[in-house]
Image (spheres, rainbow, N blue to C red):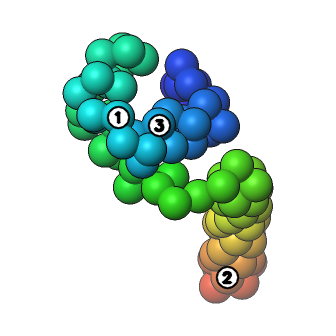
């Protein structure tokens, strides 16, 4: 996945600018982002503090690792079952 131009902390700061009363179009023009990008950020990071965003990223990473580990265990289990059903 491509690394974004802005860090999570920067995104939260940009969203706070809009919350303080600046028009969305002006913010998008200033930072060179589209309205769609802004509203995607808002749906993901809206109302978060920087510490919340860091915690979210850590949980997503842990979830990714656990899903990978589960997939490996399922593959091992399927392989063992297949080996047991074969006649030697």
Residue drawn 71% across the image and 77% down it: 77
How many C-alpha atoms fall within 10 Å of the one at disc 2: few (<14), some, or many (≥20)?
A: few
Tell me if 61 is positioned left or right of 23 in this view.
Answer: right
Which quadrant holds the C terminus?
A: bottom right
Asked whether residue 23 is in view, the answer is: yes
Tell me which label, 1 or 2, sits earlier in the chain: 1
Q: Mark 2 and mark 3: span between their CA atoms?
A: 57 Å
Q: Mark 1 and mark 2: span between their CA atoms?
A: 61 Å
Residue under pointer 2: 81
Between 68 and 86, the one lying in front of the other is 68
How many C-alpha atoms fall within 10 Å of the one at disc 1: few (<14), some, or many (≥20)?
A: few
Residue under pointer 3: 17
Q: Mark 1 and mark 3: span between their CA atoms?
A: 6 Å
Residue under pointer 1: 22
Label 1 residue SS: loop
Tell me which label, 2 or 3, sits earlier in the chain: 3
Residue drawn 56% across the image and 42% down it: 12
Tell me which label, 1 or 3, sits earlier in the chain: 3
Asked whether residue 79 is in view, the answer is: no
Please say if 32 is above or below 85: above
Between 24 and 9, the one lying in front of the other is 24
Asked if the residue under mark 3 is in contact with the one under mark 1, i.e. CB atoms within 8 Å, the reply is yes
How many C-alpha atoms fall within 10 Å of the one at disc 3: few (<14), some, or many (≥20)?
A: some
Between 49 and 61, the one lying in front of the other is 49
* Mark whose residue sits in front, 2 or 3: 3
- Residue 31 placement (x, y as % from top left): 42, 17
**Label of residue 38 in the image:** none
Label 2 residue SS: helix
Residue drawn 30% across the image and 16% down it: 29
Residue drawn 51% across the image and 52% down it: 45
- Residue 62 placement (x, y as % from top left): 76, 61
Please say if 37 is above or below 79: above
């Amino acid at each position: 996945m491509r690394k974004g131009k802005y860090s999570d902390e920067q995104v939260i700061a940009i969203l706070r600018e809009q919350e303080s009363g600046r028009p969305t179009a002006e913010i998008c023009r200033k930072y060179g982002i589209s309205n769609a990008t802004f509203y995607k950020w808002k749906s993901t990071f809206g109302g978060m503090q920087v510490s919340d965003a860091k915690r979210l990223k850590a949980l997503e990473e842990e979830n990714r690792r656990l899903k990978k580990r589960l997939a490996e265990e399922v593959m091992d289990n399927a392989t063992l079952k297949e080996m047991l059903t074969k006649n030697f």
